[in-house]
Amino acid sequence: MSKLKHFFKSFTLRDLLTGLRITGKHLWRRKVTIQFPEEQTPQSPRFRGLHALRRYPNGEERCIGCKLCEAVCPAAAITIDAGPRQSDGTRRTTRYEIDMFKCIYCGFCEESCPVDSIVETRVMDYHFEKRGDHILTKAQLLAIGDKYEEQIAEDRRQDAKYR
Amino acid sequence: MLDMIIDFFVIGAKIGLILLPLILAVAYTTYAERKIIGYMQMRLGPNRVGPKGWLQPIADVIKLLMKEVVVPSGSNKALFLLAPILFIAPSFAAWAVIPFDVELALANSDVGLLYILAMTSIAVYGVIIAGWASNSKYALLGSLRSASQIISYEIAMGFALVGVLMASGSMNLGEIVKAQDGGLLHWFWIPLLPLLVIYWVSGVAETNRAPFDLPEGESEIVAGFHVEYAGISFALFFLAEYANMILISVLTTLFFFGGWLNPFQGIPFVEEVTGWIPGIAWLLLKAGFFLFLMIWLRATFPRYRYDQIMRLGWKVFIPVTVVWLMILTFMIKAGVGPWFTGRGVL
């Protein structure tokens, strides 16, 4: 009996027609494509993208060279040299570099930072044009921080009550 | 002498009139395929080049033409370059006997059907030579698969066409269509329904299309017989595959769906209203549906395993066609109407 059933099922192409019906229906469904540069998916304020070093509103850099981020970084992407600054003798970094090819965007550096200096911004579409460009220097990181400070501050404010 | 020269140019112009729209149709079939499969997967498909992506195929062609033709160092150079030509020539040549309308064919041959069978089978040499001359294991495996697949399905396809031949009593493609005169219900798709399905599936298998695209099988053997091809030589394989798709769609229309005939023939009012539509439009409309079906199949079914393909070809299709040919014989002898009235002897 089941053999007979199988015989009719296969010769009427039932399974195949069922499959065709499903794809046929999907032809008319709403498309889910997001046209990237023009449209974007919503981002969380906790989004972890390109790194930045922040400054205080008076223009002083936040980083005090404690090296906690360097210590916590699981990919060993951060390299820091620190020492007293010549003008006022406060402890500052003389070198702060992130190797963006090593970075895994885990956000530990941001979590470990006692002064909210190193942060990850929402920027995620960036590229490097020359060999060696992937190592971001202190100056570059500070510049990124200056450029996106408004957004960074707003995101920290929104997230403040959960921290 | 002058007559011959004039004839030569007239025939050349006719060939151009068939081939140029065909190549354009091939280009836009690739666009339609990407678009339709995209839509079935709830994507948008190509939409960046030109309005709605209309210029995408043109961009693809330019890209392929500008690429370098790489000839592998271990290959047989002459055969390597000959293979794509051997593959594409038959798929173009087959169009010579296709009737687009009453008396509108390049060659109104009385052995058109045999010619079509011969041309569609000869293309396999292109595949085999391409695979062998590449001197690559994947290419060789792909071409071996292709050869066995085409030989297996050729038989079922031939048997299915024997049915058409019996039903129409002619090998002339124009006569085959004329034998189906009389409207939707007079076409051969009703008495030859199993043969239609078998012909269609074999046709899909012959063109190496999904779900029978084992010769390409990109997940198993990279790209099969055309792994080593790049640029224009790859484009020729691509062009031939899509030209074959269109050819199979048109042939299915001619054999089973009344070619250029108006489907509303015999229905009192609708026939007059649709009477102005030229035959070629009906042909293209019907063929377009089958082309769409081919793309639809690709979007729906996963690839067959090799042994499943062989089982389907030898153990299902061939017995079914033989049985149906016997049934068809009785139908013709009994003069079952409206297809075989007047031809019965019982």
Image: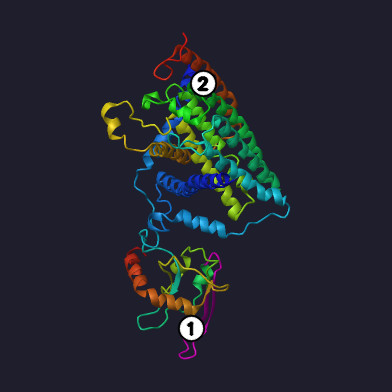
Q: Secondary structure at mark 2?
A: helix
User: Which residue is at the far top?
Assistant: B346
Mark 1 and mark 2: span between their CA atoms?
97 Å
Amino acid type of the residue that numbered disc 2 sits on in the rendered structure = Met
Answer above or below: position of B40 versus B168: below
Residue at x-position 53% and y-position 70%: A71
Residue at x-position 39% and y-position 31%: B261
- Can you give x and y, in whole percent of width and height, for residue B221 in the image? 62, 44
What residue range appears in magenta? A73-97
Q: Chain of mark 1?
A: A
Answer above or below: position of A141 versus B53: below
Which quarter of the rendered picture does the N terminus of chain B lie within? top right
Asked whether B31 or A93 is in front, the reply is B31
Amino acid type of the residue that numbered disc 1 sits on in the rendered structure = Arg
Viewer can see residue A58: yes
Single out the mark in the foreground, 1 or 2.
Answer: 2
- Can you give x and y, in whole percent of width and height, for residue B289 in the image? 41, 37
Q: Which residue is mark 1?
A: A91
**Colour pattern:** rainbow
Asked whether B90 or A105 is in front, the reply is B90
- Magenta segment includes A149: no
For residue B74, which numbered disc appears in the image? none
Residue at x-position 61% and y-position 43%: B87
- Can you give x and y, in whole percent of width and height, for residue B258 in the image? 42, 30
Q: Which residue is mark 2?
A: B166
